[in-house]
Image (tube, helix red, strand yellow):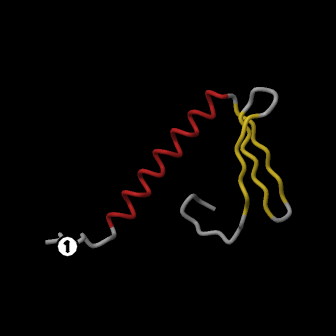
């Protein structure tokens, strides 16, 4: 499966600090639980990657739309 492959898997995600000074991304779905712990610097890198991906996705979505007609 690649990043562009559609999937029918549903999951919940929680993100928060642990009492050990880590940032946990906790993913839970039907039949699985996946706790992922990152140090704060790694978590900031992940956040930057998420923001860049959101920006790229927004740009890709906008490129397929017809331009809006200006209002008069």
Q: Position of residue 39 (x, y in %)?
A: 69, 28
Q: Residues within 10 Å of mark 1 (few under 14, many from 20)?
A: few
Q: Is residue 43 above or below residue 67?
A: above
Classify residue 42 by image quadrant: top right
Residue ID at (81%, 27%): 20
Q: Position of residue 48 (x, y in %)?
A: 51, 38
Residue found at the far right of this picture = 31
Residue ID at (71%, 53%): 13
Q: Position of residue 50 (x, y in %)?
A: 53, 46
Residue found at the far left of this picture = 72
- Look at the numbered disc 1 and give the secondary structure of its residue: loop
Q: Is residue 5 above or below residue 40?
A: below
Q: Position of residue 69 (x, y in %)?
A: 20, 73
- In which quadrant of the rendered image does the C terminus lie? bottom left
- In which quadrant of the rendered image does the N terminus lie? bottom right
Q: Is residue 66 above or below residue 60?
A: below
Residue ID at (57%, 58%): 3
Q: How many marks?
A: 1
Classify residue 38 by image quadrant: top right
Residue ID at (72%, 44%): 25
**Label 1 belongs to which residue?**
69
23 sits left or right of 48 in the view: right
Q: Is residue 69 above or below residue 36?
A: below
């Amino acid at each position: 499966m690649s990043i562009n492959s559609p999937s029918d898997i549903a999951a919940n995600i929680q993100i928060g600090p642990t009492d050990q000074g880590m940032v946990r991304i906790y993913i839970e779905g039907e039949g699985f639980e996946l706790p992922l712990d990152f140090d704060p610097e790694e978590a900031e890198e992940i956040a930057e990657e998420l923001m860049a991906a959101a920006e790229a996705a927004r740009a890709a979505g906008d490129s397929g739309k017809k331009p809006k007609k200006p209002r008069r």
